[in-house]
Amino acid sequence: MKKALIPLGVFLVLVVFLAIGLTRDPRVVPSPLIDKAAPVFVAPLLHTPEKQFSAQDMRGKVWLLNVWASWCTACLQEHPVLMEYAKSKNIPLIGLNYKDQSANGLKWLARHGDPYDLSVVDPEGRIGIDFGVYGVPETFLIDKEGKIRFKQIGPVTEEALLKTILPLAQELQK
């Protein structure tokens, strides 16, 4: 009799896990890097490849790292939000041109506008892998000590920028 209840028990446990999973937002994926040091990297600038940028250059500043690509259709969705944000210059916005050809990235920025203080290139995606990027766009808020404090998966929306990212950035600047 007890052996017959085991499959029922297993089934009920699976139903509970499924029910919990269905209540979660699939766009919210917790990053294991939150509150940990951002990966250190050095990469060539998109516009002037003979110059290098290092994440260490941003020490002492709160900044955003936006991972984008010319082949990314979702990047077009967030681009107007980033262009509007760039007018305010609240905190630096650094672009990471991910798994893209530099010429395509330059053409894309020329066509759609360039909201970035600077963009670096990551043609093989090594920097992106270190940041745990599994799709573009993704955006990281990094504090003065170089720790990742927030990760936006998918396009940055006006709501996410105004209600989450910028208030947190202001708090981190104190």
Image (cartoon, rainbow, N blue to C red):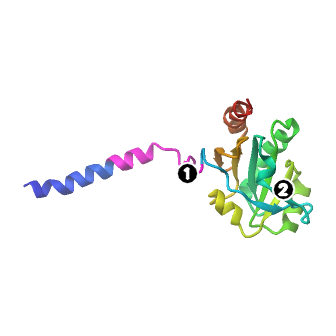
Residue shown at 66%/45% (left/top)?
Answer: 147
Element type where label 1 sits in the image = loop
Element type where label 2 sits in the image = strand
Work out which residue is located at the far left of the displayed protein and give it: 1
Measured from the top left, where is residue 62 in percent x and y?
Answer: 75, 40
Segment tinted magenta in the rendering: 16-33
Q: Main secondary structure of the magenta part?
A: loop
Residue shown at 85%/38% (left/top)?
Answer: 89
Residue 130 occupies quadrant? bottom right
CA neighbours of label 1 inside 10 A, class few (<14), some (14 to 19), many (20+): few
Residue shown at 91%/66% (left/top)?
Answer: 50
88 sits to left or right of 172: right
Asked whether 12 or 44 is in front, the reply is 44
Name the N-terminal-most of marks 1 and 2.
Answer: 1
Measured from the top left, where is residue 41 in percent x and y?
Answer: 74, 59
In the rendered image, residue 32 lying in the magenta stretch gets the answer yes
Q: CA distance from mark 1 to mark 2?
A: 25 Å
Q: Which quarter shows the N terminus?
A: bottom left
Residue 119 — which label? Answer: 2
Residue with the mark numbered 1: 32
Q: How many marks?
A: 2
